[in-house]
Amino acid sequence: MDEMDLKILRHLQDEPTIAMAQLAEQVGLSHTPCWRRLKRMEKEGIIKGQALLLDERKLGLAVHVFADVRLKTHDEETLEAFERAAGDHPQIVECFSMSGESDYLMRIMIGSIEDYERFLKKILLHLPGVAAVNSSFALQKVKMTNKLPL
């Protein structure tokens, strides 16, 4: 990775659907070298893909829940089973293994508080090894980005 690669990535984060010719011009390369760099970064896994950003409110997913999850046991089998099960539920949009008091922190997108209560009772509390779930609700989204600080 050199400064030119970072420049390409910065531009792509701002405008992922930019035409190759326009990207090359903006970063100061000709078309072919820019394309080669982009393909190399894709091959190396630096660029993992593109995402489509949707308006969650217009799609009926207005509630952001942050759930701190503690497990009963911390053996490898329980951790792996929990992580697989968490991946099976599209409402769980992020799940992080944590240090500190919680074992996992999840961000859950759901339509309403009532929907979350049902999800908690029917799904979350029944994930493998769950001992306790402490939920917090976002009042307002102040900042949310997928852009990395390059």
Image (cartoon, grey):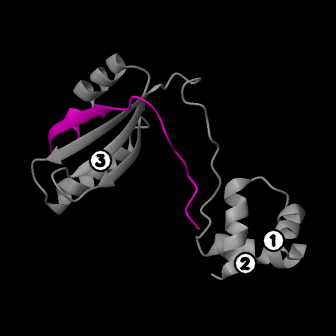
What residue occupies the far left of the structure in this picture?
Answer: 72
Q: Is residue 70 left or right of residue 93?
A: left
Which residue is at 65% across, 53% downward? 50
Label 1: few (<14), some or many (≥20) within 10 Å?
some
Q: Earlier in the sequence, mark 1 or mark 2?
A: 2
Q: Is residue 60 visible?
A: yes
* Tag 1: amino acid: Val
Q: Is residue 128 visible?
A: no
Label ID, residue 74: none
Compared with 112, 105 (above or below) is below
* Tag 3: amino acid: Leu
Foreground pick, 67 / 73: 67
Label 3: few (<14), some or many (≥20) within 10 Å?
many
Q: Position of residue 20 (x, y in %)?
A: 85, 63
Magenta segment boundaries in residue numbering = 124-150
Q: Position of residue 86 (x, y in %)?
A: 33, 44
Judged from the image, the secondary structure of the residue bearing numbered disc 1 is helix
Tag 1 residue? 27
Tag 2 residue? 4
Compared with 96, 90 (above or below) is above
Residues at marks 1 and 2 touching, judged by CB atoms closer than 8 Å: yes
Foreground pick, 128 / 140: 140
Which residue is at 74% across, 53% downward? 15
The span from disc 1 to disc 2 (Cα, nearest Å) is 7 Å
Tag 3 residue? 105
What residue occupies the far bottom of the structure in this picture?
Answer: 2
The span from disc 2 to disc 3 (Cα, nearest Å) is 36 Å
